[in-house]
Image: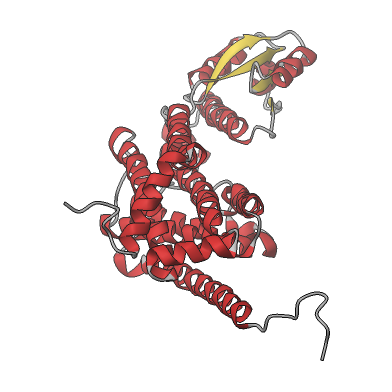
């Protein structure tokens, strides 16, 4: 029977040794399995609704007319907003917004109905908090959808009251009709673009950090690195055997998250499944090579882990999800290009929401492949430098003992 002890030095020996070490290192085990699963579960619960609806707003109705009450009902009927409270003054509404009890305040001025029917165009004012970007924009969208509808109805009524036929009055409201078609994610479902982007960005942080820690344990001193090379029958089989268990583990993590996204949350898969799997594999390998490179260059291991976290933790801001990359300054734009997660996210969006044709899908895949090759080359160069330095130190002449007389 083949046992781990009977395996000759090589890839498999280091592979099994790393699995046994993983069980004996609670921090590394938790970082590679429990932490991503917990974070994925929390994010899934937060975004499971897919779309924020019926966000509460306050109303200050200074007119109390039939028209103002009709507009309030239309705003309340919007999918995005819900009239939660009526206030008596602006200060009260401002306090509610600052406390987070409501996300906006709709103010209807005095003599609103009289001025409308007199053709004076009174202003309806909506206050909202732009610091809360998502909720603020959603409430603004709900109000903007309701008010033009009410204004159009009033305009048609005024025109027909002056004898204009209904069809002509309706045509005068929009002499050049515009058809608007939202592509790829018409319902603005946050699962389809925000959750699907947050999971890879979190996985990038975990993969780079955990790899820097696991490799750093063996690469922190020349003796440990030499021992690893002897177990693997060479430094390259040893390094491959050390990284491979985590590659499989991270692929399982990514697969589980995709199973939830595509199965339970019904994320569309409009592209090619094989391309998405290839992109995921290259993404994980690129992140592992980056973590390995940090562990080989930075000592002690804590420094490598800290720098890995510093490089990858803010990566989501440079991926172009919350803010378009074309609008970023040169530093932010090029910093995003240097992160594997940016290109994996591009490939992921292409193969899920956009359904990009195969001949247009290869750019992010090839760039991820270039990441793997370039980072592997730097790792090889560093390992060869360490090996050459160790050989030079071994072959260096022994200095004369202290106190020995020179002749």
Residue 283, quarter of picture:
bottom left
The vertical placement of 174 against 331, above or below, is above
Decide: is 26 above or below 400: above
Q: Is residue 338 visible?
A: no
**At which x and y percent is residue 272?**
27, 57
Instruction: Give whichever of 339, 222 is nearer the camera.
Output: 222
Q: Residue at x 71, y 17 (%)?
A: 99
Query: Residue 276's quadrant in the figure?
Result: bottom left
Horizontal relation, residue 204 to residue 1: left or right: right
Residue furthest to the left = 1
Q: Quadrant of residue 344?
A: bottom left
Q: Nearer the viewer, residue 28 or 85?
A: 28
The residue at the point 50 percent across, 55 percent down is: 341
Q: Residue 361 location, x and y as percent?
A: 36, 65
Q: Residue 141 or 47: which is nearer the viewer?
A: 47
Q: Position of residue 255 (x, y in %)?
A: 32, 45
Where, quadrant-wise, is the C terminus in this rendering?
Answer: bottom right
């Amino acid at each position: 029977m083949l046992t781990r002890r009977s395996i000759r030095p090589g890839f498999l020996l280091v592979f099994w040794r790393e699995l046994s070490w993983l069980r004996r290192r609670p921090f590394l085990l938790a970082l590679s399995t429990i932490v991503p699963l917990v974070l994925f579960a929390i994010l899934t619960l937060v975004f499971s609704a897919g779309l924020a609806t019926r966000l509460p707003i306050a109303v200050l109705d200074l007119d109390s007319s039939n028209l103002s009450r009709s507009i309030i009902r239309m705003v309340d009927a919007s999918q995005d907003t819900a009239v939660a409270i009526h206030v008596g003054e602006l200060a009260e509404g401002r306090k509610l917004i600052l406390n987070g009890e409501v996300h906006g305040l709709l103010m209807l001025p005095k003599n609103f109905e009289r001025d409308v029917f007199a053709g004076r165009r009174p202003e309806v004012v909506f206050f909202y908090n732009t610091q809360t970007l998502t909720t603020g924009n959603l409430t603004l969208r709900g109000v903007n959808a309701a008010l033009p509808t009410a204004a159009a109805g009033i305009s048609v009524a005024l025109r027909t009251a002056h004898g204009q036929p209904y069809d002509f009055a309706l045509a005068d409201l929009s002499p050049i009709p515009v058809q608007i078609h939202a592509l790829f994610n018409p319902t603005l479902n946050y699962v389809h673009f925000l959750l699907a982007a947050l999971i890879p960005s979190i996985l990038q942080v975990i993969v780079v950090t955990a790899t820097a820690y696991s490799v750093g344990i063996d690469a922190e001193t020349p003796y440990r690195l030499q021992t690893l090379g002897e177990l693997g029958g060479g430094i390259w089989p040893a390094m491959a055997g050390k990284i491979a268990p985590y590659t499989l583990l991270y692929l399982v993590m990514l697969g589980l998250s995709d199973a939830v996204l595509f199965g339970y949350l019904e994320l569309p898969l409009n592209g090619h499944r094989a391309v998405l799997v290839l992109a995921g594999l290259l993404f994980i390998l690129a992140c592992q090579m980056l973590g390995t490179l940090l562990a080989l260059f930075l000592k002690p291991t804590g420094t490598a882990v800290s720098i890995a976290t510093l490089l990858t933790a803010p990566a989501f801001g440079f991926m172009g999800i919350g803010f378009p990359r074309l609008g970023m300054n040169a530093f932010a734009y090029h910093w995003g290009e240097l992160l594997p997660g940016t290109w994996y996210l591009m490939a992921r969006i292409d193969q899920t929401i956009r359904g990009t044709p195969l001949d247009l899908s290869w750019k992010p895949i090839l760039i991820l492949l270039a990441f793997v090759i370039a980072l592997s080359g730097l790792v090889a160069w560093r390992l060869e430098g360490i090996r050459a330095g160790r050989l030079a130190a071994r072959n260096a002449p022994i200095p004369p003992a202290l106190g020995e007389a020179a002749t």
